[in-house]
Amino acid sequence: MIHPRPGLCGAIFGPLLFVTIGSYCYLSKEYKTYHLDPKGEQGAFREFLDKYIRVAEFIIGLATGSIVLLVGSSTLRGQGRLPWFYASPLLLLCWCVIFAVIFMVWLIYNYENYKHGNPHTAGAYALSESLGFSSLACFCIGYVWLIFAVAT
């Protein structure tokens, strides 16, 4: 019987989740451009930007802390290597971090472009949503998967 390599499911599931969420976000857009500032108030998005950045930082902190704690604790116990069944949930936590970092950079870049008068397109909006929700989904699914891997 052929078995997939350890971590292959997590390596594939993260990008697949991103594409699925991204497709839904893009197809749900009704307009070609959007205003970033709610109700047209100049600079109103800045408050939301700060909140989005803080949430992404929080998720990154939890995910990286979990990765380091799990890998570090196995090394300190003298095991050297983690069991193979930790690979996929840890890779999902890695995807979570990657998506969240790109999300923060993309939001800042997009807001700066918007402030310079460039339109906030449906594609840019969908990418922002895709990165944010993919990061959150990878975090939640990775954690639940990790709990089942540790508990069984």
Image (cartoon, grey):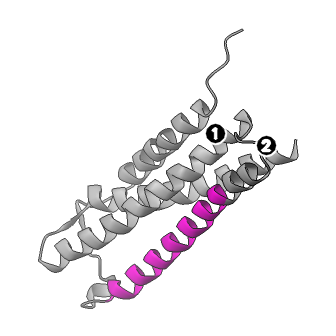
Q: Main secondary structure of the magenta part?
A: helix
Image location (x, y in percent) of residue 31: 27, 61
Seen as rendered, the residue at the extreme top is 1
Image location (x, y in percent) of residue 143: 70, 54
Who's the residue at 61% across and 34% down the image?
A: 7
Q: Are marks 2 and 1 in contact (CB under 8 Å)?
A: yes
Callout 2: few (<14), some (14-19), or many (20+) C-alpha neighbours within 10 Å? some
Seen as rendered, the residue at the extreme left is 117
Q: Where 10 falls versus 128 (above or below)?
A: above
**Left or right position of 47 against 138:** left
Who's the residue at 42% across and 57% down the image?
A: 131
Q: CA distance from mark 2 to mark 1?
A: 10 Å
Label 2 sits on what residue type? Ala
Looking at the image, can residue 144 be seen? Answer: no
137 and 34: which is toward the camera? 137
Image location (x, y in percent) of residue 70: 71, 54
97 and 121: which is toward the camera? 97
Query: Of callouts 2 and 1, which one flags the residue occurring earlier in the amino acid sequence?
Result: 1
Q: What is the magenta range? A: 44-68
Callout 1: few (<14), some (14-19), or many (20+) C-alpha neighbours within 10 Å? many
Q: Where 136 falls versus 78 (above or below)?
A: below
Who's the residue at 43% across and 42% down the image?
A: 19
> Which numbered circle lies on residue 122?
none
Label 1 sits on what residue type? Ser
Quarter-of-image position of residue 118: bottom left
> Which numbered circle lies on residue 149?
2
Q: Quadrant of the C terminus?
A: top right
Name the element at disc 1: helix
Who's the residue at 26% across and 86% down the image?
A: 40
Give the labeled residue for mark 1: 88
- The answer to whether residue 48 is magenta is yes
Image location (x, y in percent) of residue 71: 67, 51
